[in-house]
Image (cartoon, grey):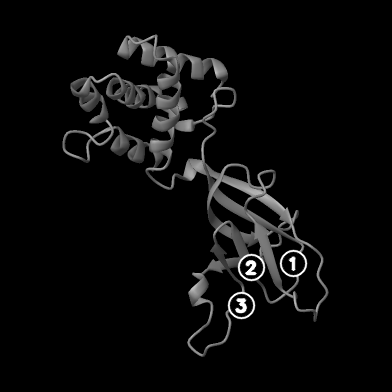
Amino acid sequence: MSVASYNQLVQDVYTITGRLDRVAETALAIRRATLKYHLADLWKNDIANAIVTLPVITEGSDLSFRYTLDLTDAATYPLIRKISNIVEYNAIRTGTEYKFDEYDNDNIMDDYRVERLNYWYQMARQATLRCDKILNQIQVQYWAFPDVTPTGYNSWIADQNPDFISCEAAAYVFAAVGKSDESARFAQMFLGPNGNDGNLSLLTISEI
């Protein structure tokens, strides 16, 4: 979505609310509405890819077969929300690339109390990967947050259903100006009157 499209969302919210004086509230409402829809599920359209070159380690050292991924590295993992999967990467695929299993950090030992192989786990903003061979590159697929800044706004949900975002944002603005009835009416569009027949359900169906 372009900056021009973001500006159109702003104008749509103004049209619904009639509150052109609420500039800051409208910008905040669009950010909140966009994040609400994206965080409502783990959407396949939010998955991004990162090809990561791993550090060279010496076989037999304490670090052998174990790699640490710094998920705070915004250049490598822009807008990362949650890792989806990790696989070995080869520029020319061989069909034998490893796909690593995810485990909780307190479940990395098997039933025989031996540490598992070919797995990864995440703690805070760091992921640890253990492999039974030395790796060169991996592909990290992850769910990404949308860019909700006015100058970089990017949301496939807003591209496909701009009214979903503008109506949800309008609910926030109405709440900010004390119009609780109007706020409730627009907020109800997210889940629908029955809780499962609103915009979220339509979005879920459209992504299948």
Quadrant of the image containing the C terminus: top left
Q: How many marks?
A: 3
Neighbour class for label 1 at 10 Å: few (<14), some, many (≥20)? many
Q: Are marks 1 and 3 in contact (CB under 8 Å)?
A: no
Mark carried by residue 135: 1
Looking at the rendered image, the disc whose residue lies closer to the viewer, 3 or 2, is: 2
SS for dot 2: strand
Residue shown at 28% from the left, 20% from the top = 174
Looking at the rendered image, the disc whose residue lies closer to the viewer, 2 or 1, is: 2
Q: Are marks 2 and 1 in contact (CB under 8 Å)?
A: yes
The Cα atoms of the two marked residues, 1 and 3, are separated by 13 Å
Neighbour class for label 3 at 10 Å: few (<14), some, many (≥20)? some
Label 3 sits on residue:
117
The Cα atoms of the two marked residues, 2 and 1, are separated by 10 Å
Query: Of label 1 and label 3, which has the lower sequence position?
Result: 3
Q: Estimate the x, y position of residue 34 in percent, counting from the top left.
A: 43, 32
98 sits left or right of 92 in the view: left
Q: Amino acid at mark 2?
A: Leu
Label 2 sits on residue:
129
Q: Amino acid at mark 1?
A: Leu
| 20 or 56: nearer the viewer | 20
